[in-house]
Image: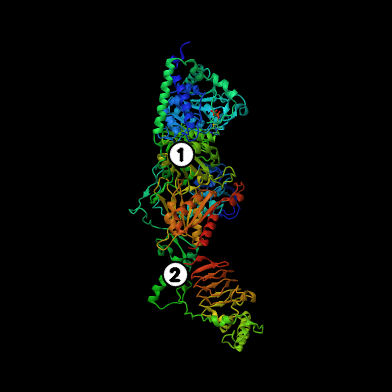
Amino acid sequence: MSDLLDQYPQDLRAALTIRFVEQRLLKLFSEGKLFGTVHTCIGQEFVGVSVARCLNDADTLFSNHRGHGHFLAYRRNIVGLIGEIMGKSVGVCAGRGGSQHVQQDGFYSNGIQGGIVPVTAGMALAHKMQKTGGVGVVYVGDGTLGEGALYESMNIISKWDLPVLLVNENNLFAQSTSQTQTLAGDINARAEAFGIKAWHSNTWEWSKLFDNMKACIEEIRRTGRPAWHRVDTFRLMAHSKGDDNRPEEYVQPFREKDPINALLKQYEHDPRWQALIREIEAEIEQAVQQAEGAPWGTVDDAMARNTQRARGYRWVRKSFEKEKGVASVRKGLEQGMADHEHLVVIGEDIESPYGGAFKCTQGLSARWPERVRNTPISEGAIAGIGNGLAMRGMLPVVEIMFGDFMTLCMDQWINHAAKFKFMFNDKVRIPVILRTPMGGKRGYAATHSQSIEKHFLGLPDTQVLCLHHRYAPALMYADLFRTIELPTLVIENKILYGQNVHAEPPAGFDLLFTDEVFPTARLKPELGAHGQADVTVVCVGGMSIDVEEAAVRLFQDEEIVCDVFMPTRLYPFDVGVLEQSLTETRRLLVVEEGQGFAGFGAEVIAQAAERFGHLGIAARRLSATPNPIPAARPLEQQCLPGASAVVNKAMEIVREFVH
Amino acid sequence: MSSSTEPTPTSGSGAGVLAEIRVPRETVNDDVVTVQDWHARHGEHVRVKQLVCSIETSKAVLEVEAEAEGYLEIIHAKGAEVPIGALVGRVMQSVPGEGAASASPAAAISESNGHSAPARSSNRLRDRIESKRSDAHAPVGSGAAAPGALAAPDASGHQLPDAPITTQTISKKAQRLIDEHQLDPRSIFAGLGLVREVDVIRFLEKRVQARKQESPPEPPSPAEWAKIEPMPTPEPRVQAAAVNSAYLPGKSKGLFGDAAASAKDRGNRSVMWLAWNYLWRNWFLGHMVRIAPRGVILKLHKMRGVKMGRDVFIDPTAIVETAFPENITIGNDVRITAGCVIMTHIKAPHYLRETGLVPVVLKPVVLEDHCFIGVNSVVMPGVTVGKASVVTSGSVVVNNVPPYTMVQGNPAKVIKQFPRPE
Ligand SMILES: Cc1ncc(C[n+]2csc(CCOP(=O)(O)OP(=O)(O)O)c2C)c(N)n1
């Protein structure tokens, strides 16, 4: 048998480095120098090493909460990791990410079990489309075999022939819970059920693991097919610092047969080995010192960039073709596909001839079959695939068939899309677009009619756009594709699809727009020098149609004059756009179709109270009644606000508040 | 989409109708679709299965065939936007009369009003904007990927130059005045998009002023009442000290109650005066106003001491102060309607008065010119109801009502401000 030190110098060095770095981290923790916690992989080092030794810079690696070893094996950046965990500016994410959120050159980790798997699928799809030859690798613990996102993704990864390696680190425990309590069936049979080839190795026979892993990854590169690799291993230390309930007599045998412990014993007196250890320890010591001496990072102007307050608004007129909302959306997407080669559209039932549940993508797949894809019913996974695509420079547009299904995308949106830019210290761009129609008045009842935009407002580093009938979706999409930097949710509207979008205001009103990329439209009453508007009305999405009708009725019947604002961007939103109008009317009415509690209207009124409270503004909200949306038309009409409700509410506020 | 509000087809009732041509529902998106083309002329003979009409939806173009042989009647012309289920044409037994074939698409839209609420609303709006500023909003070509063509903001950056206004929305109230005076709003209110009643009044005021300089004044029209000067109102005489003393607690419970208690309490009034006052003015006349013919009522009130101007109306069931009518001043052209109570004094029961919990109140009331006291309203002592103000029915007015104001409720609150002719 040839000498291991000669045969695997780099790999042994990597494994030892991981072990010593983590031991040093535990020491730093005890010394009170770490804020938060550390999940160590002591005992599992060879998994990360076995994978990293087969990867090159074209590949992408996704890791989880226990990712130090994966990172060090792949990126070998000791000071970057220690600095990150100590929270210093020399850390790879300058202290914004911490132990579970590490990022550097094709390495990403996140602390949501299973959530990173669809992102990996998206990244692998991008590799495939861009023909980089890169493979996407993702680690999942055995505890994570309980997560649904994993299986949604495995289905797609296999169906779409994506070059993905799923490494299952089977250490028998999830936090405190033994696998015997939570795992049904066979692990590898899961992969095989999806038609994914399943491999099986362990860290105790690590040279065999190296060979298997090499063969497995080579096969992925050769066939373009995904693979699943179960690696049995054992975590010797606590899940997180100091929370190990496993009896010592259970852990002890594993400690004895641990491969690094075995090596340490085997080469104890070998001068080469001693030199290696000294070298690594010196490197680590130096890294710790460098990190300790380094300054803290900053959160710079994060606050400012997410609460844009404009420098006064300029109003301009715009014109666009009058057409059905759905035609304009389709036109916008089509133009985007033509203008941006990296634009990809995915979603359920979007391919021609069906062309989407609301026909927004009709014809696209016929023209661009490679870039328009039907997906399985897996909203969480396709949102994550969008994230992965965007992270590799694609411009993904994900259609979520009904806004109600956005709940299934929540984790991808909130814990992935919204987090990566900041958490990874602004090194990651994630220009993903989710399009989805909200709104009722079509009799689709409780789970297909909701307006749940409020749940997506206020997530830093995202933007929420919202279509209304006074701004052409085609223009909005053209601008979005041109300017997108942040994850963007576009809320379309089912009623609007069948209504005309047009720039001709009702008689007596002028239609103006702020000169922003995503403008707020305004129906400004033309009253001449003497006149003043009575009430400032802000409306969300499809309510624009009802509010406009109400504004005309209110004037004709009651001589109540409305100054109507229709924001195209709901988040970030700056109430400054209403300043001039509120100064005149001192009455504010916000109309939304969703639930009012903690909704957009609440935000607008709160901002108005903060900014313009000295004007003594009276405010009202109009929103849905607090119950699920019923199916029958008369019942639905009682619950969702329409033009008459707007008229009544406006009259109420004008009567009650006489200035 | 019901048929109850369908436009009336040219050839009357259902007689002679062989088949109807209706808009089918094709996609989930559309409530309103467009008649893209007719493939046969109005009155033309069509056969079964013959393609007669194309309907454009947001998804596709639907081909509609005739289901009977006969003569085509076109109800909604090419280009019309019609709701799902609408009757766009019919196949008739005989050649139909002049149909909508020649009508403009805009007409078809307004005809299709009155279906479901959203459809009606959008149609109504669309109808009105049809002619709106077509020059200012020339559509851009479909290739326009850049943000829409912009009208440049002016240098100051905040205010746009006014676009020429060619159509207006006129409020119903303004329309009433416009009709009454046969005005042409387009020329008179050019530059105004929303025309309110006050705009019309302002115009009429100016016109009257201009005419007055040319010729002697005409009798005032309803729109000109606003500038009639109120008659000089005499200072209300309130002898609070003297009268209040009449209400001081007394021992005697004689015929005239507290008022006749003692010479000191009575102030300078003689017992005979009080007797006369009570019997004649407060009791006799006070009852007569309720049964007297209308023409006499006002005279009786004046005899009671109420001061009033011209053209006053007081309903027989109104109570215009029982004890101190002389403290009430009413201007010109005032209406006090059924069941109203105008009070200048408050006199609580002995206990409340004597303990001081509810002191006696005696204050004048002034109802200025043109004001209107709605049925069953109460005007409390000390209140002045301003010129041309309205107290809506059932209100209890405790505070002064400013001129040109409508109040409502108990206590009455301002609910509306009328435009004031300046
Ligand atoms: C979605 C989600 N649920 C729960 C947790 C909390 N959590 C962190 S690690 C962990 C156990 C994971 O077990 P396993 O997947 O086997 O990985 P291991 O820790 O054994 O490496 C849990 C429950 C989490 N981070 N994310």
In this view, the residue in front, A643 or A625, is A625
Q: Nearer the viewer, mark 2 or mark 1?
A: 1
Q: Secondary structure at mark 1?
A: loop
Which residue is rendered at x = 57% and y = 32% of the image?
A: A148
Report the side of A173 relative to A433 (left or right): right
Q: Mark 1 packing: few (<14 Cα in 10 Å), some, or many (20+)?
A: many
Q: Residue furthest front?
A: A31
For label 1, the residue is A487
Q: Residue furthest top?
A: A1
Q: Is residue B107 visible?
A: no
CA gap, disc 2 and disc 1:
56 Å
Are the residues under marks 2 and 1 on the same chain?
Answer: no
What is the x, y in percent for residue A426?
41, 36
Q: Residue furthest left?
A: B155
What is the x, y in percent for residue A292?
41, 33
Above or below, comparing residue A569 to residue A143 in the picture: below
What is the x, y in percent for residue A96?
44, 36
In this view, the residue in front, A401 or B140, is A401
What is the x, y in percent for residue A73?
45, 24
Q: Which chain does the numbered disc 2 sit on?
A: B
| Residue A257 sits in quarter | top right
- The type of residue carrying mark 1 is Pro
Q: Which chain does the numbered disc 1 sit on?
A: A
- The type of residue carrying mark 2 is Pro
Q: Is residue B388 visible?
A: yes
Above or below, comparing residue A119 to residue B30 in the picture: above
Q: Secondary structure at mark 2?
A: loop
Q: What label does residue B421 carry, if any? A: 2
Above or below, comparing residue A35 to residue B282 in the picture: above
Which residue is rendered at x = 50% and y = 77% of the image?
A: B332
